[in-house]
Image (cartoon, rainbow, N blue to C red):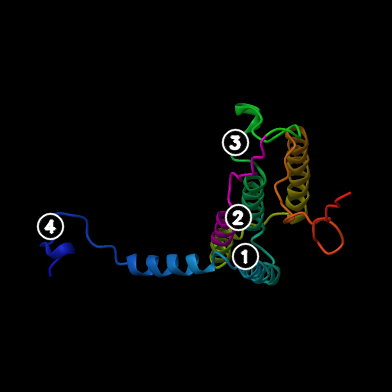
């Protein structure tokens, strides 16, 4: 067979992508890692620590680190924000006890948050091998500015959560009584 479904390959079409088998293998690994949330995040923390040690030993690349911090802050905001903006579309979450429950849907799902953070961290790690990205800066100013930006942004996000009454995290199913069982009804 010469091509897909036994057809002869067309001439003048796009050349085959030599990276396609690698992309498929990567997608299979990503698909298999999806249910293992804790291990994925522990792996991200390990890569982050490796990056931090490299930056500390090189005593440079603070601009790259600052850019990673800003990017991850932006990802965190997407993770904490609802998909439907209540300021533009009106409140979609119930505001009274008798309204219908609508679950919190994130603008940026957890897996995409993790994957984007990992890719950014690997790109930042790669950038540490190129001296042109090691621009000398006074890092305490960058750190102070990042903390100010973080606190101002988080304050605004928390005020948004309070105003529209949503919590981006669930702590699991509510339990009742001592052993997590619902209280028994009495026949009195």
**Label 4 element class:** loop
Using the image, determine if residue 154 lies above or below residue 37. Answer: above
Mark 4 sits on what residue? 10
On screen, residue 162 versus residue 112, left or right, reads right
Q: Nearer the viewer, mark 1 or mark 4?
A: 1
Q: CA distance from mark 2 to mark 3?
A: 17 Å
Report the magenta residues as a range. 100-119
Residue 19, image x and y in percent? 34, 66
Q: Specify the farthest residue to the right.
A: 188
Which of the pair 27/153 is nearer the observer? 27
Q: Which residue is mark 3?
A: 84
Any mark on residue 110, and which?
A: 2
List x then y, in percent, for residue 125: 58, 65
Query: Which residue position is annotated with label 1?
Result: 37
Q: Along the polypeptide, which appears first: circle 1 or circle 4?
A: 4
Answer yes or no: do the residues labelled 2 and 1 have beta carbons within 8 Å?
A: yes
Do residues under tags 2 and 4 come within 8 Å of each other at their CB atoms?
no
* Residue neighbourhood size for the residue with mark 4, other residues' Cα within 10 Å, grouped as few (<14), some (14–19), many (≥20): few
């Amino acid at each position: 067979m010469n091509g897909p479904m036994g057809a002869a390959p067309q001439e003048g079409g796009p050349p085959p992508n030599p990276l396609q088998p690698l992309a498929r293998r990567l997608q299979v690994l990503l698909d298999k890692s999806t249910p293992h949330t804790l291990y994925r995040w522990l792996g991200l923390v390990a890569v982050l620590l490796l990056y931090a040690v490299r930056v500390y030993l090189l005593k440079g690349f603070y601009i790259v680190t600052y850019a990673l911090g800003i990017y991850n802050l932006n990802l965190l905001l997407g993770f904490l924000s609802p998909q439907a903006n209540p300021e533009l579309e009106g409140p979609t979450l119930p505001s009274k006890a008798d309204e219908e429950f609508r679950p919190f849907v994130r603008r940026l799902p957890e897996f995409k948050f993790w994957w984007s953070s990992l890719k950014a961290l690997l790109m930042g790690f790669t950038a540490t091998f190129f001296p042109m990205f090691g621009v000398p800066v006074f890092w305490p100013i960058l750190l102070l500015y990042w903390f100010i930006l973080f606190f101002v942004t988080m304050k605004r996000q928390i005020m948004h959560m309070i105003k529209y009454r949503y919590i981006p995290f669930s702590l699991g199913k509510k339990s009742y009584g001592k052993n997590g069982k619902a209280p028994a009804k009495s026949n009195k």
